[in-house]
Amino acid sequence: AAATGQRSLAPAGRWTIDIPRDGRPQLLGEPIDAATLLQRLREQAETPPAVRLRGDGATDFATIEPLLAACAEGGVSDISFGVFPVGE
């Protein structure tokens, strides 16, 4: 990203991907889809980050599955799941 002058939205450490009730995943408040997630994972040096997928109780697996597949293809071995606290 630096070589192209583009801003990278790939944080270091653990990445938390929020999946709000509308079903549109976000990384750092910016929309992200499975293809973009995979691209950003591939931009990482040798070690992919840990990824946390966080949604609410109504999040469909059909929304999560492409993100999980991108993580697997991108070499992520540390994936966790969380839910939004009530009221968020």
Image (cartoon, rainbow, N blue to C red):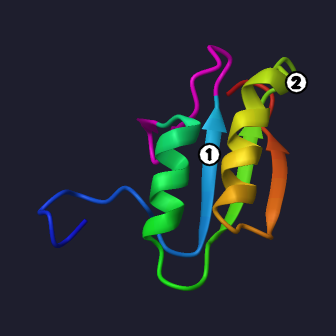
Q: Which x, y percent locates residue 22?
A: 62, 14
Q: Relative to 42, does residue 73 appear above or below in the rendering?
A: above
Q: Relative to 83, does residue 43 appear above or below in the rendering?
A: below
Q: Earlier in the sequence, mark 1 or mark 2?
A: 1
Q: Residue furthest left?
A: 5
Residue 27 appears in the figure: no
Neighbourhood count class around disc 2 (C-alpha, 10 Å): few under 14, some 14–19, many 20 upward? few
Name the disc covering residue 28, or none: none
Q: Quadrant of residue 17?
A: top right
Please name the residue that numbered disc 2 is placed on: 57
Q: Residue at x 47, y 74 (%)?
A: 44
Q: Residue at x 57, y 23 (%)?
A: 24
Q: Which segment is the magenta one?
A: 20-31
Q: Residue furthest front?
A: 73
Apparent side of residue 13 relative to residue 59 in the rendered image (left or right)? left
Q: Are marks 1 and 2 in contact (CB under 8 Å)?
A: no
Apparent side of residue 41 relative to residue 18 in the rendered image (left or right)? left
Q: Quadrant of residue 49?
A: bottom right
Residue 2 appears in the figure: yes
* Residue 30 in magenta stretch: yes
Q: Residue at x 65, y 19 (%)?
A: 23
Name the disc covering residue 17, or none: 1
Q: Which x, y percent locates residue 41?
A: 53, 62
